Amino acid sequence: MSLFNAPATIHLIKIHFAIFFIFTSLYYAVDFNKHFECSRDLYSSFTPIYFSAVVHSSLGFGDCTPKTLLGRRLVTFHTMVSFVLTMLVLGSWRFNHRHTT
């Protein structure tokens, strides 16, 4: 049995990636350098992608942080949405795994 062969799980994973790209686009749209501060020389066109991946995976290295209210709200919402989606993917996989074996 494949790890993610259930249609519901695959659909949730697609939504997960879509949300990642939506938030990455939002970080580009809000002028990342104005609303976020990085401790290293990370200011490049890659920085919003890197930051979005760190927030989306709930790692939170701390090298980039929001410095405005808008930045904090975006990060908070991004973290909540990605956490809920991760739990849905894991729950869907677990449900499908338990009922097909």
Image (cartoon, rainbow, N blue to C red):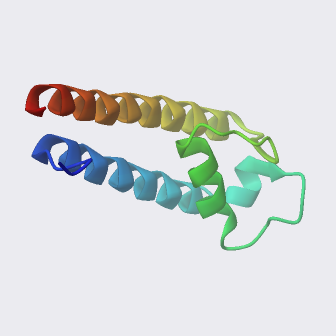
- Judge by depth and name the residue closer to the eye, 92 or 49: 92
Res 28 → quadrant: bottom right
Q: Is residue 49 above or below residue 81?
A: below
Q: Residue at x 75, y 59 (%)?
A: 33
* Residue 92 percent across, percent down from the top left: 23, 32
Is 74 above or below relative to 91?
Answer: below
Name the residue located 33 percent from the left edge and 32 percent from the top edge: 90
Image location of residue 4, percent across then percent down: 24, 48
Residue 67, position in %: x, y?
78, 40
Which residue is rendered at x = 51% and y = 58% of the image? 24
Q: Quadrant of residue 55?
A: top right
Q: Residue at x 57, y 53 (%)?
A: 53
User: Can you name the residue that lies furthest to the bottom here?
Assistant: 45
Is 29 above or below relative to 85? below
Q: Quadrant of residue 69?
A: top right
Image-based side of 9 in relation to 36, left or right: left
> Which is more toward the observer, 68 or 59?
59
Count the marks: how many?
0
Q: Quadrant of the C terminus?
A: top left
Q: Is residue 45 above or below residue 51?
A: below
Name the side, left or right, on which 52 lies relative to 22: right
User: Relative to 32, is 83 on the left or the right?
Assistant: left
Q: Is residue 77 left or right of residue 87?
A: right
